[in-house]
Amino acid sequence: MSESARTPSAIEAAQERFIALWGEMGSAWGIPRTMAEAHALLYIVGEPLNTDDVMQRLGVSRGNASMTLRTLVDWGLVARTHSRGDRKEYFKAEQDVWRLFATIVRERKRREFDPLLEALEACRGMTEGAVPHRRVDAEVARLDSHHRRLDRMLELVRTLDRLSERFITGGGPGIQLAAKLLGKAKG
């Protein structure tokens, strides 16, 4: 076997590095490493791959590859495709990075941000209309202070929620425009 047959090309080496970096980043964000790596693989090769391709390239089991690809499809990051004359399912990642970002924001919002907002509103509701048992000025002041802190936090979270909705509904171009405007803003 020639040396060039054993040595990965510069493109393959760069792809492997990208996949590893995306996997590390995904892990830091609480996304399973294999899921992030499978997404990175599908994105960076830019063409549809089947489950066998993903298994081989990432060195994972069929079950792991299948579950990971199904989750990526459920998240909307990857689409199923078929190749004429081939019975296998193929998978292709979204190639528009701004749409990709909007999809990730949408999914993270649904899974993490929406429940947080709901829990904070329930927390605020626990003391809504509450009156201290002894109506002591210190107790009233403590309750008022508690409400102000929660209200400020709720205002922040609701504002971020509305902002993320604008990103999501605007799709790729909306996020791209917002990023450019924020990039020009002076701090």
Image (cartoon, rainbow, N blue to C red):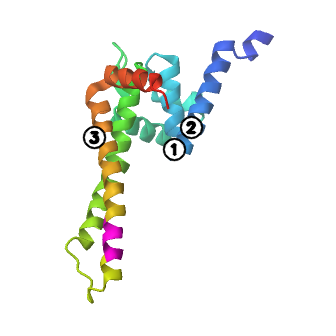
Q: Residue at x 23, y 80 (%)?
A: 131
Residue 145, magenta (yes or no): yes
The reply to whether dot 1 and dot 2 touch (C-beta < 8 Å) is yes
The reply to whether dot 1 and dot 3 touch (C-beta < 8 Å) is no
Q: Residue at x 61, y 32 (%)?
A: 21
Mark found first going from the N terminus, 1 or 3: 1
Which corner quadrant of the image does residue 167 belong to? top left
Q: CA distance from mark 1 to mark 3?
A: 22 Å
Q: Residue at x 51, y 44 (%)?
A: 29
Q: Is residue 107 left or right of residue 9?
A: left
Of the two numbered discs 1 and 3 in the rendering, the one whose residue sits closer to the viewer: 3
Residue closer to the observer: 35 or 65: 35
**Residue 90 seen in the current view:** no
Q: Which residues are magenta?
A: 141-147
Residue closer to the observer: 121 or 72: 121
Q: CA distance from mark 1 to mark 2?
A: 6 Å
Mark found first going from the N terminus, 2 or 3: 2
Q: Which mark is residue 29?
A: 1
Q: Which residue is mark 3?
A: 162
> x and y percent of residue 138 in the render?
35, 81
**Residue 23 seen in the current view:** yes
